[in-house]
Image (cartoon, grey):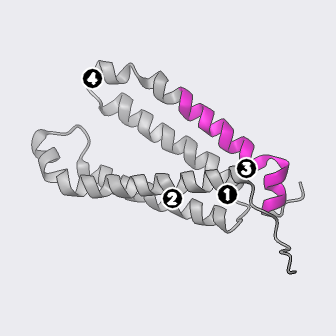
Amino acid sequence: MVTSRSPVRPRTVALITWGSFALGGLNVWRAYALGGQSDLLIELGASVDPRLRLVMALVWAVVWLGLAVALWRRRPFTRLALPVAWLLYVLYHLALLFFFVRSSVAQAGWLGYTLPALFILLYVTWVLNRPAARRYFGSNE
């Protein structure tokens, strides 16, 4: 019987990995949709240039897919990089909401966006820094 010497990936780390992959896929889909509808959005006078949003969606797709691969490969820097990326992602979307959305009804929902995002940030930070994850990443802190 052959036993593996590599630590078993905790389910919570696997969940974070798949969530990062899903966010990357979501941003690829967003870039695809913006690419297909950018002419119409420009004609309608969108408050943010759709081409800029397309580029940002591609940047976020690369970030999230890269973090998912790095997490899958047990790269220790992801323990810090993933919560920082999540925080920047939330701040990016809040900036879009506050500076470019003209609807006061949409802006009034900032708390409903921020509270779950804060919960996810705390959860991701906890998952990646608990003892089982430290062993998985090979960290002896």
Confirm or deny contact between disc 3 and disc 2 (CB under 8 A).
no
**Nearer to me, 86 or 12:** 12
- Residue 41 sits in which quadrant? top left
Disc on res. 103: 4
Residue lying farthest front? 1
Number of numbered discs overlaid on the protein picture:
4
Name the residue type under label 1.
Thr
Kindly report the distance in space between the C-alpha atoms of the residues bearing marks 4 and 1: 37 Å
**Nearer to me, 101 or 122:** 122
Left or right: 97 in relation to 5:
left
Left or right: 47 in relation to 126:
left
Disc on res. 78: 1
Quadrant in the picture for the C terminus: bottom right
- Residue 125 sits in which quadrant? top right
Name the residue type under label 3.
Leu
**According to the image, label 3 marks what residue?**
128
The kind of secondary structure element at disc 2 is helix
Kindly report the distance in space between the C-alpha atoms of the residues bearing marks 1 and 2: 11 Å
